Image (spheres, rainbow, N blue to C red):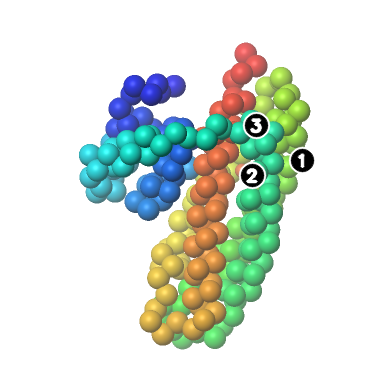
Amino acid sequence: MATPMTAYRDRTVGDIAARLAGATALFRNHKIDFCCGGDVPLAEAAARGGLDLADLEAALGALAATPPDAPPDSATLADHILIRFHETHRRELPELVTLARRVEAVHRDHREAPHGLADLLERAAAELEDHMSKEEQILFPAMQADYRGSLDMPIRVMRLEHDGHAQTIHAIEELAHNFAAPADACRSWQALYTGAEKFVADLREHIHLENNVLFPRFERRWS
Ligand SMILES: [Fe+2]
Ligand SMILES: [Fe+2]
């Protein structure tokens, strides 16, 4: 585990995101993957993205000067994830699918129309429903009851499924041209990209909180 004395460049992006308040927003703005791709050192992530490492370290240093809030206990964090992310995905995805179907139908001849986005969002909703149900029925109740046996196997399965969600995120971003609507896009098209961009940001934050904050508290602690 990294200590506070370790230089940011040598710490993994996921570790920094988990421990430094405000780091996730900074990483999101620089398109640094801190959820499923978060196990690489900051120096490597900066090199991959063509980013200035010194600038990044300076920005992280400025964040560190702000005292962070105390991290919530695991039961509270799990509740937060359920309300802020599980419920939000379930509420917002059906509307996004409806919007995407309308945009694809009305603008089927438009060169930049996001052909296939509705099907992709529908598949993402089904995959997420299956995944979130498992967390809600098995994993989170065990965590909230402070179960002392091994949760390593179900956590490993959830992490693998998160990797699949990350691939879905990339596919959505690609199909939706990184949410840059053309100048002649109608209101529905603009609303679709605004909503899809929010969904993707939410899902990244959701996976980050599980992979980098909640799950590590329960891995290998039984041995
Ligand atoms: Fe979740
Ligand atoms: Fe999850």
Amino acid at the residue labelled 1: Gln
The quadrant of the rendering that contains the C terminus is top right
Q: Residue 74 carries which label?
A: 3
Amino acid at the residue labelled 3: Ser
Residue in front for this viewpoint, 22 or 121 = 22
From the top left corner, tell me how far across and down residue 212 is, in percent: 51, 35
Q: Nearer the viewer, mark 2 or mark 1?
A: 2
Q: Does the residue labelled 2 lie within 8 Å of ligand 1?
A: yes
Amino acid at the residue labelled 2: Ile
Q: Mark 2 points at which residue?
A: 81
Tell me the CA gap for discs 2 and 1.
14 Å
Is 82 located above or below residue 113 in the figure? above
Residue in front for this viewpoint, 158 or 189 = 189
- Residue 218: quarter of image: top right
Is 12 located above or below residue 162 in the figure? above
Using a 10 Å C-alpha cutoff, classify the residue at mark 3 as few (fewer than 14 neighbours), some (14 to 19) or many (20 or more): some
Q: Residue 137 carries which label?
A: 1
Tell me the CA gap for discs 1 and 3.
16 Å
Q: Which residue is drawn at 52% across and 42% down?
A: 208
Q: Is residue 47 visible?
A: no
Looking at this rendering, what residue extends furthest in the top direction? 223
Q: Is mark 3 on a helix, strand or loop?
A: helix
